[in-house]
Amino acid sequence: MSSGPGDILQLVRRDEANTRRDIQDLTGLSRVTVAQRVDSLIDAHLIKESGGGAATGGRRPNRLVFDVQHSMLAVATIDTAHSRTAITDLSGRILDHETVDVAIVEGPEAVLTALAASILGLMERNGIGLERMAGTGVSVPGPVDPKSRRPSQPPIMPGWDAYPIADHLAEAIPVPTFVENDADAMAFGEQSTGFSDSNALCLVKVSTGIGSGLVLGGTVYHGIDGGAGDIGHIRLAGVDALCQCGSRGCLAAVASGRAVAMELSERGVPARSGRDVGALLAAGNVDALELTHTAGQRIGEVMATVVSMVNPGVLVVSGDLASSALLGGLRETLYPRSLARATRNLDVRLSSLGEDAGLIGLARIVADSLYSADAVNARLA
């Protein structure tokens, strides 16, 4: 393995090495070289010494840990009817947050200007200056081109295609800015906090739209064009309902929060979005429970193919419609339509992080990029 200071930092961040001796044993570097690498990381405030490590005879060695509070991150999750912003430390721990009531249909300039104002307000409220900000992250409910990091023909985001989100935010907050798909960010949040030992995790988000995120081998899988996981626009046989993307028969046209809300309205139950459906589910509305259960069955039909192809260890169900009704319906069709081998070790569950999953996932994605081995080696060369 390479043995620059950035590589040493990764060993510490992954908890593979907690002392200088651990680093020597893992890298084969001399004691002097390890001391130089560690000192450069301490001088850069990237790691710090904390208490004592395991004693092996003689004085207890100092424990080395990543200094997650030497800089802060700002993250924002954009949804159809509202957004959330937060300030986190470098571990993804949320220090402060707020909801921004701005609809995605208002367009990128209005939404991003509101998010920038919210982030700056959080920074001021917490006494955090720009000099302490390391980076920002934003997630959107649509595909993101992995090269340009701009929205790529997002079906439910009119006016956002190829919009320079990072450039817009950097005008107000001049730090490196990263853009991710919302389900990808949520999947990474779930995997990195609760299922780090799982080699493959899939998350399906059911809100006003439907999307999914894949984390394979500890890394978000985007696909060649950023379209991996866009299951909401898989077409179902025998379905003719018109979808927001302009096609007919999409999964989202019959099983998304928007589709359920439309059916509820036809039954005389006022609802316009996945958020409204979620509120009705929480209140125990019988029609909402019935229609959400049916939506879960349709989603399970599609997820059976995903599970059989990917063979994940964990399938997390999240979003406004995440509930026992949705989970029950999904299980009813997922298991009978999947190979037994693909589901025998599958853990299907509701999200444990809820709305925070995207914020935490974004923060960890940004931190992993800013403090990768290559980035730190270049900085400390």
Image (tube, grey):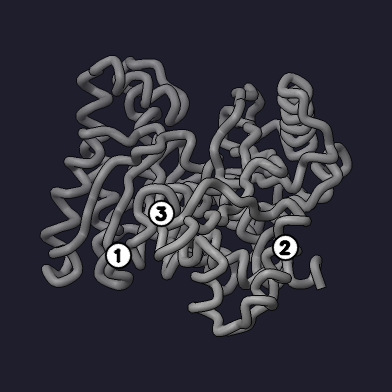
Residue 343 in the image: x percent, y percent?
17, 63
Residue type, label 1? Pro
Determine which of the numbered discs, if any, sits on residue 39 in the image. 2
User: Which image quadrant for residue 374?
Assistant: bottom right
Name the residue that disc number 3 marks. Answer: 191
Residue type, label 3? Gln
Name the residue that disc number 1 marks. Answer: 312
- Density class for disc 2 (Cα within 10 Å; few <14, some 14-19, many ≥20) is some
Residue for point 54% across, 72% down:
23
Q: Earlier in the sequence, mark 1 or mark 2?
A: 2
Q: Is residue 109 above or below residue 341?
A: above
Q: Secondary structure at mark 3?
A: helix
Residue for point 32% across, 49% down:
316
Residue type, label 2? Asp
Residue 86 in the image: x percent, y percent?
63, 32
Residue for point 56% across, 36% down:
79
In this rendering, does residue 233 appear at all?
no
Q: Earlier in the sequence, mark 2 or mark 3?
A: 2
Q: Is residue 83 above or below residue 232?
A: above
Q: Answer left or right for 62 relative to 334.
A: right
Q: Mark 3 and 1 residues: CB-CB less than 8 Å, in contact?
A: no
The CA distance from mark 2 to mark 3 is 32 Å
Q: Secondary structure at mark 2?
A: helix
The CA distance from mark 3 to mark 1 is 12 Å
